[in-house]
Image (spheres, rainbow, N blue to C red):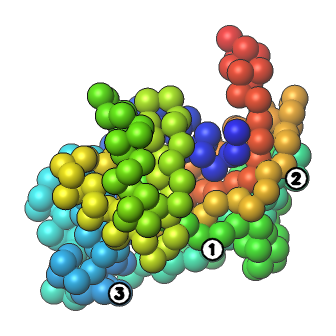
Amino acid sequence: MSGHSKWSTIKRKKAKADAERGKIFTRLIKELTIAAREGGGDESANPRLRTAIAAAKASNMPAANIDRAIKKGTGELPGVSYEQGILEGYGPGGAALFIEILTDNHKRTVAEVRHNMNKYAGSLAESGAVAWLFEKKGLVTILKGGLEEDDLLMIVMDAGAEDIKSEDDMFEITTATGDLENVKSALEENNIKYETASLTMYPKNTVKVEGKEAEQLLKLMDVLEEHEDVQNIYSNFDIDFSLIQETEE
């Protein structure tokens, strides 16, 4: 199992809703602000903003918070200026890490991420060091419920989906970047609710990580995920998670 897909599943399962609510809202507010700043406040003409609003609503963010974040992005309200960035590096076992950040202080965030990387046997690298190991794709996740995979397959493939995978209680649909909106529209037309829909980075190949290095890598991923300026982490690791779980137990 590739690190990208499995880590997404683990994050969702281990999320402590109440304790992490503030951090989740912080990240969502940043994304709403950036999306509005770059593409305007009209969600019908701004796919990124539409996706951000859907994510905020799915996390039960109050409408007033969403509206305020959008207005800060469009300049209707004063607000903090956020800067997007990419950090690249390696974790234990040689796993590549592609980290998207959104921060109001780039130097501080880089320093904190570097500290955490070093603490767990990882290291930051130069720009472009690992980016070539990934390709951008659209990713849509859907809770299975009573949904049949064959029925879903017919709907999304006709809309341009590339693949569909079954992951525990979820279906994961991958698309080319230009077909993400078409797949979302097809799902909405068929009254199928999706959990998330966004652009993501998929590894072209994977690196197997085992033993102590695997445990260190998962700790590093966990710590980085906790950082409020880290929006997304993508990796190419391949770990036998059943062995890790047995060790923890």
As drawn, the label of residue 139 is none
Q: At label 2, which amino acid type do we have?
A: Gly
Whether residue 232 appears in this view of the structure is yes
Local secondary structure at mark 1: strand
Tell me the residue that label 3 is attached to: 38
Q: From the top left corner, tell me how far across and down residue 180 is, in percent.
A: 41, 68
Which amino acid is tagged 1? Ile
Reply above or below: 191 against 41.
above
Please provide percent x and percent y for residue 80. 34, 78
Q: Position of residue 167 (x, y in %)?
A: 53, 35
Residue neighbourhood size for the residue with mark 1, other residues' Cα within 10 Å, grouped as few (<14), some (14–19), many (≥20) = some
Sequence-wise, which precedes: disc 2 or disc 1? Answer: 1
Residue at far top of view: 249
Query: Separation of disc 2 and disc 1 at Cα?
Result: 19 Å
Q: Quadrant of the C terminus?
A: top right
- 140 sits left or right of 127 in the view: left
C-alpha separation, residue under disc 1 versus residue under disc 3 = 17 Å
Q: Which residue is mark 1?
A: 86
Q: Which residue is depicted at the point 34% across and 53% down?
A: 155
